[in-house]
Amino acid sequence: MTGVSAAGMLAGVDRAANSRATAQKLGHEFTFRPRGKPKKEHQFELSPFCLQMDFTGYNIFDSEGIKRIELDGNLDAQTLAYKLIDEWIPFFECKKCGRADYCKYTQTDKYRSGRLADIRCGIIVEAITNFVRHTFPLLEKMTTEQVQAYLDGAFHLEKFLYNAEQATGWFINDGILQFFGEYAPRYFGYVINLREDLNKAASEFRILPDFASNKALLFVEGETEEVFLKKLRESRMAWFYYLAVEVYGGCGNRDTKRIQMLLESRVNQGYNIFIQGDADGKDSEIFLDLCEKGAITKEHSFVFRHDFESAIPPEILYQALRTLGKLENVEYVDFEKIVTSENTSVVNLLNEKFHINIKRKRLKIRLAEAVGDILNRPHFPPPPVWWHNEEFMETELGKFLKFIMHVR
């Protein structure tokens, strides 16, 4: 890994970051009690150069993330950054990093001719420095729990950055991969492990509102809904393009703890959870138990009265089936009359009246894609875009898409 000395990087680190606060409260001392029920008071002290906080009672991980190291006394941003860098970033000979040939942080070894010095990775030193510099003032309004989460999240963020930097160096340096020989493929697979520390950082940062690290995640009942939303992503509309979707497995999981455990695991990873389900013509409050247990809120859930297929407006369903080679000798007027005649799933009606069995997985998936294709067309349904069509937006599928628009 490549690097610079911590002292050179950190000189005067937080003067600019705290200049406005210093100008307003220069020379004054103040204490404040965080929201909630903290163990103690935070104590900040302002000087002409920096804001300080009493970190007594807080702790940070050691370099391996196993033991805890107690903090003590007043620290400013510069001193805290020093502490984190000293504890977390190991010394490393830059030449062993695959990026040494072009890294701006490398240093020549003064005592070994032709060698690079063993120093802390300058990229990670600067990253930690900037992290503390730009976030330290936020500690003033944090609870005790949030401050500890800030410190723990910083550790996992540092581990992610350090390991990602090292892996990148491996991947771009053929000499290093040649050295690994037959084991080289394992190092490409190693990159998957990076998400562990990233998930842990997200879990800690999720309770820090200023970090805005929560990402929305929509759970859908089955693969049909997932395929439909992926098809809408092709429209490049932000509602769908950035939407994270995960299948939870359908009605078979409603009466078990599996779905609750799944939701809780994603919440702990920093996700803001939304969920969709099918009532199959029964009680629409299928997520009531999860709402009562606090796993989700009612506002974050959407339930189809029967199922996804039954939510598709007849005109769109007719056109989608026609594109799949179905209903060749059926007029739309007759089709609409049949599929709207009974309060039951359209899946059953299509099978009984037209011998179209969309319970078959392949046909069900193709139908979802066809419906998505129709909505992606610029001139269907009129007016030009579906979200401006009030009639469509009042259909069950329209209401579902309106729900999606608020997933964030």
Image (tube, grey):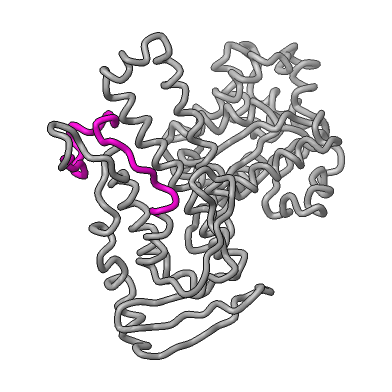
Q: Is residue 363 visible?
A: yes
On whether residue 13 falls in the magenta region, the answer is no
Examine the rendered structure and indicate whether residue 336 appears above or below residue 322.
Answer: below
The one nearer the camera, 41 or 264, is: 41
251 vs 157, left or right, is right
The quarter holding residue 116 reads: top left
Instruction: Give how far across and how far down residue 319 sits, in percent.
Output: 57, 24
The quarter holding residue 247 reads: top right
135 vs 372, left or right, is left
Instruction: Give how far across and how far down residue 360 sits, in percent.
Output: 71, 14
128 vs 393, left or right, is left
Examine the rendered structure and indicate whether residue 334 appears above or below residue 138.
Answer: above
Examine the rendered structure and indicate whether residue 131 appears above or below residue 346.
Answer: below
| Extreme residue toward the top, this view | 182
Instruction: Give how far across and how far down residue 300 sits, in percent.
Output: 67, 51
Q: Is residue 405 visible?
A: no
Q: Looking at the magenta stretch, what is its main secondary structure?
A: loop
* Residue at position x 57%, y 14% in the image: 324
- Counting the numbered discs, the total is 0
The one nearer the camera, 312 or 126, is: 126
Instruction: Give how far across and how far down residue 282 sits, in percent.
Output: 86, 38
139 vs 228, left or right, is left
The one nearer the camera, 222 or 273, is: 273
Q: Work out which quarter of the rendered image holds the N terminus and state it.
A: top left
| Extreme residue toward the front, this view | 111
The one nearer the camera, 307 or 99, is: 99
* Residue at position x 28%, y 24% in the image: 172
User: Over which residues does the magenta segment extend?
Assistant: 85-109
| Extreme residue toward the left, this view | 113
On whether residue 91 falls in the magenta region, the answer is yes
The quarter holding residue 266 reads: top right
